[in-house]
Image: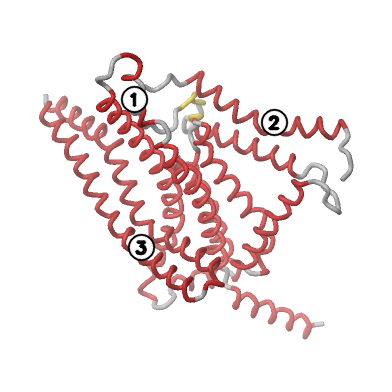
C-alpha cells in the first residue's frame, strides 16, 4: 500500500468535515430556534419563515431545511468515498463503494430486468436519501421523512415515472390498459392508479412518524414511573428519572435504525416493482421488432 | 360551551382509539406471512435471502391498511379538535 501524500489527506479531512458540517449546522439551528421542550411534546415541522409569493405563500419549514442538509451531507460523503479511485483499489473505502454499487446493481437487475439498467443511480439515490433522512432522528433533528409533504413529493415523482413507462406503447395502449380484465372495471382501475402514490407516501411517513410518537410516549411514561417509584426519596436521587436511562435506546434501535433503513429499502423496492410492472415489455418488444422488419422491407 | 368542547375532545380521542382497531388486521396478516416464511426457510434454507426479501415486501404492503388507520388517528388527535372547536365557536358567534 502506497503512502498517502499530505495533500490527499488534507482533502480527505476537508471532505469529511463538509460531511459532518451540515448536520452540526442543523443542530445549531435547532438549538437557536427551538426552546427546550418541557415534558411531552409531539409537533410537526416548525416553520422558520415565510416567503411572500403572489399566488401562495411559501413557508420554509424544518423538513425542507433538514432535507437540504441531508442532500449536502450525502453529496460530500459521496465525494469522500470516491476520492482517490484507482483501477487496482488501494483504499478500503473503494471496496466499500464497489460492494454497495454491486448490491444495488444486482437488485435492480433482478427486480427490473436489463431494460431498466439505467435506473441504478435513481434507486440508489432514493434509498440513500430516505435512509439518511430517517437516521437524522439519531442526532435529535426533525426527520424530513416524517413530514407527509416530503414523502408525497417522492411518491408523485414515482407516479410520473410509472405513467411515463405506461405511455411507452402509445396513448391508445395506455387507455386500453384501464379496461383490462373487463371494461366496466375501469373506474376501479383508475382509483387504484391514484392509490399507488398515496399508499407509498402514507406507508413511509406513517412508519417514521409512528416511531417518533411511540418513542416520545414511552419516554414520558418512563419518566412518570420513575417519579412514582423514586419520587419520595430525598435529595437529587428523587429527581433523576432512572427508568429513562437505557430503556428508550432499545426502542430507538428498532424505530430509528431498523425501521428507517427498512422503509428506505421498501420504498426503493416498491419503486422498482411498480415501474417495471408498468412497462408493457412484451408489447414493446413486438412493436420494435415489427418496426425493424418494416424498415428492412422498405430499404 | 365548555360541555360542547369537552364532548368534542372526548369524541376525537374515542374516535382515534377506535380507528386503531384496524391494527388487528395487519398484525394477523403479517403474523401469517412471517409464519409461512419461517416454514419456507425451514424447508429450503438455501433460499433464505429471497424469502426474507419477499416477506418484508409483503409485510410492508400488508401494513398499509394499519397505517391508514394510524394517519386517521393522528389527524383526529392533533388536527381535528382544533378545527371542530373553531367551527363550534364560529357558529356560536353567528347565532349570537
Depth order, front residue of A291/A12: A12
Are dots 2 and 1 on a single chain?
Answer: yes
Observer-nearest residue: B32 or A247? A247
Q: Position of residue A299 (x, y in %)?
A: 82, 82
- Seen in the picture, residue A133 relative to B63 is either above or below; the reply is above
The one of A198 and A9 positioned closer to us in this rendering: A9
Mark 2 to mark 1 CA distance (whole Å)? 34 Å
Residue A232 at x, y percent in the picture:
24, 20
> In this image, B5 relative to A150: left or right?
left
- Give the letter of the chain under mark 2: A
Of the two numbered discs 2 and 1 on the same chain, state the one appearing first in sequence: 2
Across and down, in percent, residue A255 comes to 44, 44
Q: Residues within 10 Å of mark 3 (few under 14, many from 20)?
A: few
Residue B31 is tagged as: 3
Q: Residue furthest top?
A: A235
Identify the residue under disc 2. A18
Res A172 seen here: no
Q: Chain of mark 3?
A: B
- Measure how far apart labels 1 and 3 are at the Cα level: 35 Å
- In which quadrant of the rendered image does the N terminus of chain A lie? top right
* Callout 1: SS: loop
Horizontal side of residue B75 vs A18, given as left or right: left
Tell me what residue is drawn at x 49 percent, y 51 percent: A263
Amino acid at each position: 500500500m502506497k503512502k498517502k501524500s499530505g495533500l490527499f489527506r488534507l482533502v480527505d479531512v476537508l471532505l469529511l468535515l463538509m460531511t459532518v458540517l451540515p448536520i452540526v449546522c442543523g443542530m445549531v439551528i435547532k438549538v437557536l430556534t427551538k426552546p427546550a421542550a418541557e415534558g411531552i411534546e409531539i409537533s410537526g415541522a416548525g416553520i422558520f419563515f415565510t416567503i411572500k409569493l403572489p399566488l401562495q405563500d411559501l413557508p420554509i419549514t424544518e423538513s425542507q431545511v433538514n432535507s437540504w442538509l441531508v442532500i449536502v451531507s450525502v453529496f460530500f460523503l459521496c465525494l469522500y468515498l470516491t476520492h482517490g479511485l484507482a483501477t487496482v483499489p488501494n483504499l478500503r473505502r473503494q471496496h466499500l463503494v464497489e460492494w454497495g454499487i454491486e448490491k444495488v446493481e444486482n437488485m435492480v437487475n433482478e427486480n427490473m430486468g436489463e431494460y431498466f439498467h439505467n435506473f441504478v443511480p435513481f434507486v440508489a439515490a432514493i434509498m440513500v436519501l430516505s435512509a439518511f433522512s430517517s437516521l437524522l432522528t439519531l442526532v435529535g433533528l426533525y426527520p424530513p421523512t416524517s413530514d407527509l409533504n416530503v414523502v408525497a413529493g417522492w411518491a408523485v415523482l414515482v407516479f410520473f415515472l410509472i405513467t411515463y413507462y405506461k405511455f411507452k406503447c402509445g396513448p391508445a395502449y395506455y387507455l386500453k390498459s384501464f379496461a383490462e380484465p373487463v371494461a366496466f372495471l375501469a373506474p376501479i382501475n383508475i382509483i387504484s392508479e391514484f392509490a399507488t402514490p398515496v399508499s407509498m407516501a402514507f406507508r413511509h411517513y406513517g412508519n417514521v412518524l409512528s416511531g417518533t410518537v411511540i418513542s416520545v410516549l414511552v419516554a414520558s411514561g418512563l419518566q412518570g414511573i420513575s417519579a412514582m417509584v423514586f419520587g419520595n426519596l430525598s435529595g437529587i436521587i428523587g429527581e433523576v428519572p432512572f427508568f429513562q436511562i437505557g430503556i428508550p435506546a432499545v426502542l430507538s434501535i428498532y424505530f430509528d435504525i431498523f425501521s428507517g433503513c427498512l422503509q428506505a429499502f421498501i420504498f426503493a423496492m416498491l419503486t422498482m416493482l411498480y415501474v417495471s410492472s408498468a412497462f408493457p415489455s412484451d408489447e414493446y418488444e413486438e412493436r420494435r421488432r415489427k418496426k425493424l422488419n418494416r424498415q428492412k422491407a422498405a430499404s | 360551551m365548555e360541555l360542547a368542547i369537552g364532548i368534542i375532545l372526548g369524541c376525537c380521542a374515542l374516535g382515534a382509539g377506535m380507528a386503531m382497531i384496524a391494527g388487528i388486521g395487519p398484525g394477523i396478516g403479517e403474523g401469517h406471512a412471517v409464519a409461512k416464511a419461517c416454514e419456507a426457510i425451514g424447508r429450503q434454507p438455501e433460499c433464505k435471502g429471497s424469502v426474507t426479501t419477499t416477506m418484508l415486501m409483503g409485510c410492508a404492503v400488508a401494513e398499509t391498511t394499519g397505517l391508514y388507520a394510524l394517519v386517521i388517528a393522528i389527524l383526529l388527535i392533533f388536527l381535528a379538535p382544533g378545527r371542530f372547536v373553531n367551527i363550534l365557536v364560529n357558529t356560536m358567534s353567528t347565532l349570537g
